[in-house]
Image (spheres, rainbow, N blue to C red):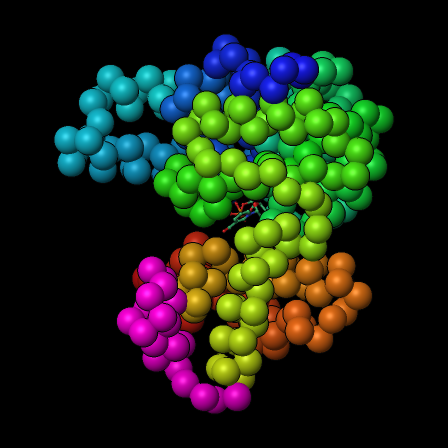
Amino acid sequence: MREDGAALPSTVPVAVIGAGTMGSGIALVAARAGHPVLLHDAAPGAIQRGLDGLRRDLDRLVEKGKMSTAERDAQLGRIQPLPNIDEIGPAGFVIEAIVEDFGVKRDLFRRIEAAVAPDAILSTNTSSLSVTALAAVLNRPERFLGVHFFNPAPILPLVEIVSGHVTAPSVAATAFATCLAFGKTPVHCRSTPGFIVNRVARPFYGETLRLIAEGAASPATLDAILREAGGFRMGPCELMDLIGHDVNYAVTRTVWELLFQDPRYKPSLVQKELVDSGQLGRKSGRGFYDYT
Ligand code: NAD
């Protein structure tokens, strides 16, 4: 890690753990900035699915004349599959984007810390878990922070650089500068429940789910009102379908629990039903809307 807060050089390998919605996009962001990228996922076939999805996205840019085939091949060529997490050793910057579950992330970080160099920066893309509590599972918690991208990661510029209680300022400065070099707009924040965006956005989703539970209006009506009268680019139900109801529900539960069960943040049975039935949104083909 660099004391001056300069970006990590683009020769430093970035490891992205989790090749789902967020991880594959984050891998592309780092590869686009010239870094060699190691992409890992624990589920069989998931790394290849992530890579295939990126290729389809870049092929569309090539078809529209927005990218040359050479640039597409160069970006994809910088992303190498990492089937075995214990071979993560060369990575200087690790960005974790696996399931939003404290215990699973904790076990993963213990394994990662045992394999990487002592000065590698370890980060999580968690939407809501405590960065301070996750850092505490490490031998060197000062090198750990949240680097929170937004969905879709290759397109949305904002990244929250989340410092836990003991994150070294030099680590946060290096992550900030590196995200700038990724072409992003980083902001520093502290590890509070939901950080900034997910905290502010909770009532947006929460009140929408309450209105649906009360039978006030359909998801399509609520989305249309917020888009057309509220000026939002996407309505709340469309956005929850994009995020994934499993992820959104997990984030709400965490924020509610971290705020000592403040009723303003209470999770919704409407969303729990969607999760329980496997209607997770776009990624499963069905949520509030049908995508098949
Ligand atoms: P996802 O379900 O699309 O992908 C998660 C991937 O992690 C899956 O491919 C799964 O196989 C893999 N995985 C699970 N356990 C693993 C393990 N132990 N080791 C390696 N891989 C493992 O989820 P996502 O939407 O990409 O979310 C990932 C993280 O990013 C979560 O922490 C989430 O809160 C956060 N996040 C999500 C969004 C969003 O809009 N979806 C936005 C910002 C942050």
Q: Residue furthest bottom?
A: 215
Q: Would residue 116 be seen by someone viewing this image from the given angle? A: yes
Q: Would residue 87 be seen by someone viewing this image from the given angle? A: no
Q: Residue at x 53, y 24 (%)?
A: 178
Question: Residue 144: where, in percent of width, then height?
Answer: 72, 31
Q: Is residue 164 left or right of residue 16?
A: right
Question: Residue 40: where, in percent of width, then height?
Answer: 56, 30
58 vs 8: above or below: below
Quadrant housing residue 25: top left
4 vs 44: above or below: above
Q: Residue at x 66, y 73 (%)?
A: 264
Q: Residue furthest front?
A: 4
Question: Residue 253: where, in percent of width, then height?
Answer: 68, 63
Give whichever of 16, 53 is nearer the camera.
16
Q: Residue at x 41, y 29 (%)?
A: 183
Q: Is residue 88 magenta?
A: no
Numbered disc total: 0
Give whichever of 290, 221 is nearer the camera.
221
Which quadrant is the N terminus positioned in? top right
Quadrant housing residue 242: bottom left
Magenta stretch: give its range: 214-235
Q: Residue at x 61, y 77 (%)?
A: 269
Question: Residue 262: where, in percent of width, then height?
Answer: 74, 71
Q: Is residue 28 left or right of residue 291?
A: right
Instruction: Give the quarter the ligand 1 occupies.
Output: top right
Which quadrant is the C terminus positioned in? bottom left
Q: Is residue 229 magenta?
A: yes
